[in-house]
Amino acid sequence: MIDASTDATMKLQKRISKQRERRRYRVRNRARKLGRPRLSVFRSNKHISAQIIDDAAGKTIVSASTMEKEMAGAAGGNTAAAAKIGEVIGKRAVDAGIKDVAFDRGEYKYHGRIAALANAAREAGLSF
């Protein structure tokens, strides 16, 4: 039998999960409306990754992650690593001929590691 506190906790977790899902779809659909390639960011506790996606073709054009071999020495859970990923994704995108993108932060707030990645990508030559 489930006690009242466990039931309340489960309801709270479910509500938060639904809010995150709605936020993710809302942000992603706004980015898709712009008609530009989308710079999508994924953040976990240990790593951060970014990829530029062409939604019309359904293909990933460029990607960068702290799990790559050349990033092996950097810890992925801090703003320095996020800035490095932003720099790398910006350089790879410019090399691939992409200048304008739509920033897709997903369900994450534009703060901390997400903001560091975005600022570094802007400095590397991307426009959004």
Image (spheres, rainbow, N blue to C red):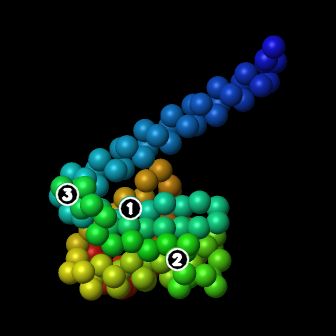
Kind of residue indicated by mark 2 = Glu
Q: Are marks 3 and 2 in contact (CB under 8 Å)?
A: no
Coordinates of residue 22 in the picture (x, y in percent): 43, 38
Kind of residue indicated by mark 3 = Ala
Front of the two marks 1 and 3: 3
Q: Earlier in the sequence, mark 1 or mark 3?
A: 1
- Quadrant in which the C terminus appears: bottom left
Q: What residue is shown with label 1?
A: 40
**In the foreground, 98 or 9:** 98
Return the mark for residue 68.
2
Label 1 and label 2: CA atoms lie apart by 17 Å
Q: Residue at x 18, y 55 (%)?
A: 56
Label 1 and label 3: CA atoms lie apart by 15 Å
Q: Residue at x 53, y 85 (%)?
A: 70
Q: Quadrant of residue 44?
A: bottom right
Return the mark for residue 57.
3
Q: Do we see residue 119 in this rendering?
A: no
Q: Could you say whether the residue bearing mark 1 is in a helix, strand or loop? A: strand
Q: Are marks 1 and 2 in contact (CB under 8 Å)?
A: no
Q: Quadrant of residue 122?
A: bottom left
Return the mark for residue 50.
none
Q: Do we see residue 15 in this rendering?
A: yes
Front of the two marks 1 and 2: 2
Q: Earlier in the sequence, mark 3 or mark 2?
A: 3
Q: Is residue 127 above or below residue 52?
A: below
Coordinates of residue 112 in the picture (x, y in percent): 56, 68
Q: Residue at x 55, y 37 (%)?
A: 17
Q: Is residue 107 above or below residue 81?
A: above
Coordinates of residue 41 in the picture (x, y in percent): 44, 62
Q: Is residue 16 above or below residue 1?
A: below
> Farthest top residue?
1
